[in-house]
Amino acid sequence: MSITTWMIVLLGLLPVIIGVSIVLYLIKKLNFKGKFHLNKITTITFFSLLIACGVIYELIPKEPSVEKLTGEKLVQLQTENNSFQRSLLKLEENKLNQKFLKEEWSHEMNGNTLSIEYKGNELYSTGVFVEWIDTTDQKVEGKVYRSNINVYGLNLDQKIPLHKVEWTGNQLVIHEPSVQELSFDQFSTRLYSFNQVLNDEEIRMVRGRTYIHLKVPKHIEIVDPLGLQMY
């Protein structure tokens, strides 16, 4: 486990440690005799159950936490997105941020026409970049990237599925992810009225995109009816 995970576990066990200390203190300092013997057994049983519940809770697998980012970090993420797209537009592969690389593959073509199709409603979420290769081979190489996605300061890179890319003969089909419903609870020691929450909460979004970089032999014609290619 990471250092952060260990810190969370230790903080979670802190109430258990305090409970054990209280039990040991009571057993040592209080003299339970006669009619108090039953109270002693009851007290020890209660604290034992409390400790057991705390240990069981810590052992239960939990969903990973979602990090809420600062405004400065959001600006940095958007800058990374913009820089990545500029470098991809110029086909400067050596300048691409490799943390965005999600998949890479190759496909052997049977003809000289490559068709690009999209299944979904959000066409703007995907861009295709074509790099023409001087070769007589029929192999098309591809890499799938996705830039930073952040909503309300919440990093959602690991929460939202990738676009699915599949080949059907000489047709490259891009499938949009299914709709995802995500919910988060926010706890604060500050007191708000409903109107204050709406007015004080700054809605910010870093809208990441999926990019598909294709290396295509120059003799192959591309059919792109939806205009997914970016120039």
Image (cartoon, grey):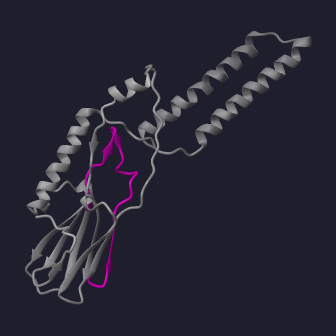
For the residue pair 93 and 197, the one nearer the viewer reads as 197
- Picture quadrant of residue 28: top right
Residue 229 appears left or right of 202: left
Q: How many marks?
A: 0
Instruction: Confirm whether the magenta stretch covers residue 156.
Output: yes
- Residue at x 61%, y 21% (from the top left corner): 18
Residue 36 appears left or right of 91: right
- Residue at x 50%, y 45% (from the top left corner): 63
- Residue at x 82%, y 22% (from the top left corner): 42
From the viewer's perspective, is residue 94 above or below residue 52?
A: below
> Which residue is the extreme one toward the front?
195
> Which residue is the extreme one toward the right?
34
Quadrant holding the C terminus: bottom left
Residue 229 percent coordinates (x, y):
17, 68
For the residue pair 142 and 226, the one nearer the viewer reads as 226
From the viewer's perspective, is residue 214 above or below residue 61?
A: below
Residue 172 percent coordinates (x, y):
27, 76
Residue 191 percent coordinates (x, y):
45, 19
- Picture quadrant of residue 206: top left
For the residue pair 199 and 7, the one nearer the viewer reads as 199
**Which stretch did the figure color magenta?**
145-170
Instruction: Confirm whether the magenta stretch covers residue 158.
Output: yes
From the viewer's perspective, is residue 197 above or below residue 61?
A: above
From the viewer's perspective, is residue 1 above or below residue 214?
A: above
> Which residue is the extreme one toward the bottom?
111
- Picture quadrant of residue 168: bottom left
- Residue at x 23%, y 79% (from the top left corner): 115
